[in-house]
């Protein structure tokens, strides 16, 4: 693994330390998980943006439309 250093305001560091203590995690674990979640969301948004025109062309605009189509 490699090391990344970031600068944060002291108030943010205090909040981060408090959350990590409560969740029994290291700051590194918390940061790693947060980055992975963020990257997954961004990847999902990119895929969604690509397929949205095809879904709209099929009339699939809402979750209900999709579930109805699956029946």
Image: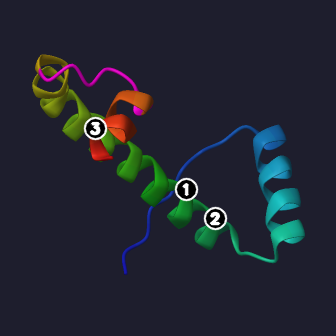
Callout 2 secondary element = helix
Its colouring scheme is rainbow
Residue drawn at point x = 21 percent, y = 19 percent:
59
Residue placed under numbered mark 2 in the picture: 30
- In this rendering, the answer to whether 65 lies above or below 28 is above
- In this rendering, the answer to whether 7 lies above or below 29 is above
Q: Quadrant of the N terminus?
A: bottom left
Q: Where residue 70 sits in the image (x, y, percent)?
A: 29, 46
Callout 1 secondary element = helix
- 3D distance between C-alphas at marks 1 and 3: 34 Å
Q: Say few, some or many: other residues with alpha carbon within 10 Å of mark 2 (under 14 / 14 to 19 / 20 or more).
A: some
Q: Residues at badges 1 and 2 in contact (C-beta under 8 Å)?
A: yes
Segment tinted magenta in the rendering:
58-63
Q: Nearer the viewer, mark 1 or mark 3?
A: 3
**Quarter of the view holding residue 64:** top left
Q: Where residue 25 sits in the image (x, y, percent)?
A: 74, 75
- Outermost residue on the bottom side: it is 1
Q: Which label sits on residue 69?
A: 3
Residue placed under numbered mark 1 in the picture: 34
**Quarter of the view holding residue 48:** top left
Callout 3 secondary element = helix
């Amino acid at each position: 693994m490699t090391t990344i250093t970031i600068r944060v305001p002291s108030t943010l560091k205090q909040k981060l330390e408090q959350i990590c203590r409560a969740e029994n995690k290291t700051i590194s674990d918390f940061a790693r998980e947060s980055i992975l979640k963020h990257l997954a969301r961004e990847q999902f948004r990119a895929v969604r943006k690509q397929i949205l025109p095809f879904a709209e062309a099929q009339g699939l605009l809402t979750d209900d439309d999709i579930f109805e189509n699956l029946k």
